[in-house]
Image (cartoon, helix red, strand yellow):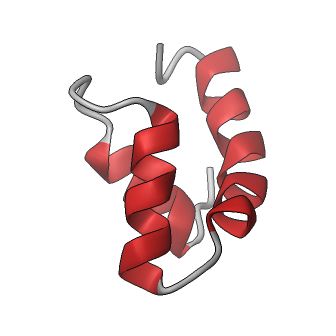
Amino acid sequence: MRLGTLGAGLVGACDGDLTARQLCAGLAVLTETDTATVVAEVLPVLRDLVKDGLLR
C-alpha cells in the first residue's frame, strides 16, 4: 500500500497509546495543517489498513 506523508505518520505512530483522532490532531500540529484536512486524508487509509488486518 502506498502512503502519503500523513498516512505514513499515522501508521508510524500507531502503538496503541493514542487514538486515531489524537494522532490526527498531532499530525495537524506537526504539519501545520487543519485537523479536518488530516482526517479527510488519513481516514480512507486507516479504513483500508483495518480492513486488510494490518491495524486493529
Is residue 49 found left or right of 16 in the rendered image? right
Residue drawn at x 26%, y 23% is 16
Residue drawn at x 50%, y 70% is 28
Placement of 56 over or under 36, stated as above or below: above
Number of numbered markers: 0
Residue drawn at x 32%, y 37% is 14
Residue drawn at x 37%, y 60% is 26
Is residue 8 found left or right of 47 in the rendered image? left
Residue 25 placed where, x, y %? 47, 56
Residue 32 placed where, x, y %? 49, 86
Pick the residue in front: 47 or 54. 47
Pick the residue in front: 52 or 18. 18
Placement of 27 over or under 13, stated as above or below: below
- Residue 51: name its quadrant: top right
Placement of 48 over or under 36, stated as above or below: above
Is residue 5 found left or right of 41 in the rendered image? left
Residue 17 placed where, x, y %? 21, 27
Placement of 30 over or under 3, stated as above or below: below
- Residue 33: name its quadrant: bottom right
- Residue 4: name its quadrant: bottom right
Residue 24 placed where, x, y %? 50, 53
